[in-house]
Amino acid sequence: MAVGMSRPERLRVAVRYTFAMGSGNLSTFLSSLSMLGLVLAIGLLIIVLSVMNGFDKEMRERILSLVPHITVYSHLPMDRWQQSAELIAAHPEVLEVSPFASFDALLMRAGDIETASGIGLDVNDKAVLRRMLSGIPEDAARDFSKRPDGLVLGVGLADKLGVAPGDQLTLIAPGSGRENNLQSAQFETVYLSALLDTGTELDQATALVHLSLASRLAGLEGNVSGLRVTTGDIFAVQRIGWELTENLEPGFYTTNWMMTHGNLYAAIQLSRDLVSILLFSIIAVAAFNVVSSLVLVVFDKRGDIAILRTLGASPGDIGWIFILQGGMIGLVGVALGSLLGALGSLAVPGLVSTLEGLLGMRFLNTDVYPVSFLPVDLLLQDVVLVGLVAFAMCLVAAVYPARRAAGLAPALVLNQDR
């Protein structure tokens, strides 16, 4: 009477078919090829996802630390902005409110002239200065705060002008009063206190000055252009903006970061989704390779299968052996692929920097890309998701070869091998 195989016996046979080394062991060779394909597909997917996550993180944490989440404007001169700021700050989801004055300008140094987007900051608001000047040394930030003619310039813009901290530049602001002509343009000598190096596109055009100076250059006569609002939820800015305008007097309106940088963020998300679909299809191809490999293993081991059947193994035992083999291929592939992806994600920024140094060129430049470096953000949930999907695909891929193996007739196989 056949008693079948115990679970340890099934596992032992599956391990032997998967990992046993030796000359002429076709099953181990095919299993290794399947594992290799799975390792490369999983590792590549994790690396690419980490890079896309890095762009997403830099967009949220670096660019949006300088770009206001919500900007409040008024159709009329904002001469009582302090009262409006108090009403805005009372909103439960608003973290920070600060006035600003913006203006378009030309910066001139010797014979070089570059355009800039001027922003005036309230130097008495320590929270704003700490956030906007987070990458600047404390002594340089303190020097900027104390000098009425202080200027903080984006490092990309400074490179174009060939200036360094301590230099003086001429700032030219076009007239914005009633006499909007060349004669009303204002010239101001400013002192470069520090360079703003965020590694983003903002470095190419940003010029920060004192609020009082910016208000005068913008022709606001001591008023401000608007209020910069920082919120706790950057994806709820449209709703919060509507709520703010309802609490303010008529004539106020708001814009938000989604209007200026939303397309960039959406493009990053779309690229991430498309690349994920593409690379998950590569994992599916690797799983299909498991099907073909196990079918060949079944053909190679049909004599062994027939002997196991004659010794009492049931069709279910044979099927479970190949299910377990597919699971082992998936388990080893997922483990090694996840390790490769994690190590590769951590090594990619250094490798890119080294390659840029060897070739003497920049792969990413803020003239074209939102950041000037390759960001990486390795997330555990991505590794777990990719591993679970790949392992499930391997188990599903093993079902067909297992059914083929379970359906072999031992008498017919042994008769053919005589």
Image (tube, helix red, strand yellow):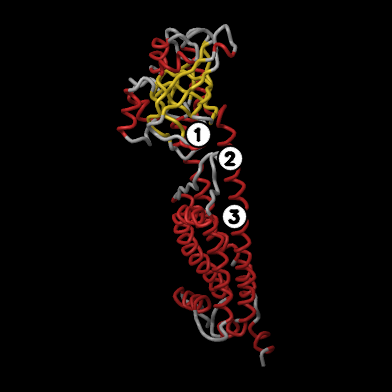
> Residue 291 placed where, x, y %?
63, 68
Per the image, the residue denoted by label 1 is 161
> Residue 390 placed where, x, y %?
54, 59
Distance of mark 2 from mark 1, alpha carbons?
Answer: 19 Å
Image height check: is 261 above or below 186? below
Front residue (pair 385, 172): 172
Image height check: is 418 above or below 16? below
Image height check: is 117 above or below 391? above
Mark 2 or 1, which is nearer the eye? 1
Q: Amino acid at mark 1?
A: Leu
> Residue 169 placed where, x, y %?
45, 26
Single out the residue that lies furthest toward the front: 110
Q: Residue at x 54, y 46 (%)?
A: 364
Q: Secondary structure at mark 2?
A: loop
Rate crowding at label 2 as few (under 14), some (14 to 19) or many (20 or more) other CA atoms within 10 Å. Answer: few
Mark 1 or 3, which is nearer the eye? 1
Front residue (pair 27, 33): 33
Q: Which mark is residue 280?
A: 3
Distance of mark 1 from mark 3, alpha carbons?
Answer: 47 Å
Per the image, the residue denoted by label 2 is 368
